[in-house]
């Protein structure tokens, strides 16, 4: 039942939308889902349908200075230098510091703030150990909504990703980012990648994705939908408001499962 999926792509292409749709698709199947928001400005929670109240006290792990200090043995006051643990304890973090909605659990990673934060190394170490734990040791569907690249993944962790999805909108600039994602992913050992087209307005856009994907298989396309705006304004999950998008994401999930089961590079 475990399945580990990383979602990447240029900012604004719809990574969070796809992550939320996949989360509800797998939850609808009765599978436990851990959705991880690795964006420094997290917005996956509202997309999943979590209320403002449920998210009120939910902080990104990267902002929990006391937790980082406790688990790594670093100085909570910051400062440069010093020794800290390279393998901090993280197994309890997904349950203790997450929010839950049905079979979907939401965890916020956040980003390590560069330029004088004073705890760059300990914070980064904790986040990477946490990602390693959820990918290697938890038996559930893990959806990792990455922020512009693969910064939370390392060579020892990336091999646990069953499939990486590169999300794009029908523009050349977006597809250039997809090619950069391919290079970054393969550099750290991820060789099962699929392209997902988003904001597709019809057959012409699908043909664009197919024509510019190169060797990258197209898992499917999500169409432009007015339901997306309705979901954003109402706080309801997009999956529940658009049967057509639910159908499209089911086809994408089927392509993911096929590739993950095959064990072959794509």
Image (cartoon, rainbow, N blue to C red):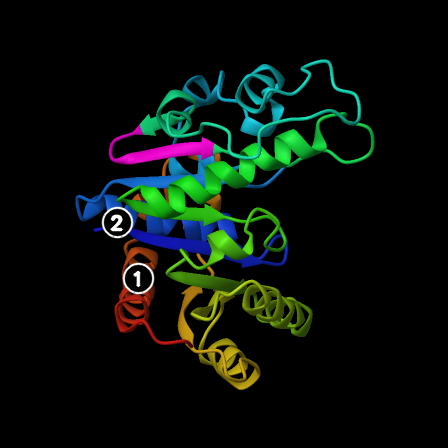
Look at 54% across and 27% down and name the residue there.
Answer: 61
Q: Alpha-carbon distance for marks 2 and 1?
A: 9 Å
Towards the viewer: 131 or 196: 131
Towards the viewer: 13 or 228: 13
The magenta segment:
101-107
Marks 2 & 1, CB-CB < 8 Å contact = yes
Residue 26, percent across and down?
Answer: 26, 49
Report the side of 255 relative to 38 (left or right): left
Local packing at callout 2 (Cα closer than 10 Å; few below 14, some 14-19, many 20+) is: some
Q: Quadrant of residue 117 in the image?
A: top right
The answer to which of marks 2 and 1 sits earlier in the sequence is 2
Magenta stretch, main secondary structure, is strand
Look at 24% across and 43% down and name the residue there.
Answer: 27
Q: Quadrant of residue 253 in the image?
A: bottom left
Callout 2: SS: helix
* Quadrant of the snapshot with the C terminus: bottom left
Q: Is residue 222 above or below residue 239?
A: below
Residue 87, percent across and down?
Answer: 51, 34
- Residue 43 visible to the viewer: yes
Q: Which mark is residue 265?
A: none
Towards the viewer: 75 or 141: 75
Q: Is residue 50 magenta?
A: no
Q: Which mark is residue 26?
A: 2
Callout 1: SS: helix
| Outermost left residue | 30
Residue 260, percent across and down?
Answer: 31, 66
Q: Which mark is residue 253?
A: 1
Q: Is residue 121 above or below residue 71?
A: below
Look at 35% across and 76% down and name the residue there.
Answer: 264
């Amino acid at each position: 039942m475990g399945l580990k999926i990383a979602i990447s792509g240029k900012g604004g292409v719809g990574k969070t939308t796809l992550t939320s749709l996949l989360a509800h698709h797998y939850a609808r199947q009765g599978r436990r889902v851990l959705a991880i928001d690795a964006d420094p400005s997290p917005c996956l929670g509202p997309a999943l349908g979590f209320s403002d109240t449920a998210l009120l006290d939910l902080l990104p792990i990267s902002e929990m200075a006391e937790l980082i200090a406790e688990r790594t043995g670093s100085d909570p006051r910051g400062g440069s230098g010093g020794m800290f643990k390279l393998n901090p304890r993280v197994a309890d973090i997904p349950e203790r510091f997450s929010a839950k909605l049905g079979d979907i659990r939401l965890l916020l990673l956040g980003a390590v703030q560069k330029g004088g934060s004073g705890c760059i190394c300990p914070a980064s170490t904790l986040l990477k150990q946490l990602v390693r734990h959820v990918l290697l040791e938890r038996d559930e569907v893990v959806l990792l909504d990455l922020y512009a690249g693969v910064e939370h993944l390392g060579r020892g962790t990336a091999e646990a990703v069953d499939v990486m999805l590169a999300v794009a909108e029908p523009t050349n600039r977006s597809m250039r980012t997809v090619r950069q994602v391919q290079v970054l992913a393969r550099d750290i050992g991820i060789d099962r990648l699929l392209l997902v087209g988003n904001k597709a307005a019809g057959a012409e856009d699908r043909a664009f994705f197919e024509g510019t994907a190169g060797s990258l298989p197209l898992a499917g396309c999500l169409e432009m939908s007015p339901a997306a705006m309705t979901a954003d304004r109402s706080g309801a999950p997009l999956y529940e408001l658009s049967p057509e998008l639910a159908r499209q994401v089911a086809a994408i999930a089927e392509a993911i499962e096929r590739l993950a089961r095959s064990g072959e590079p794509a």
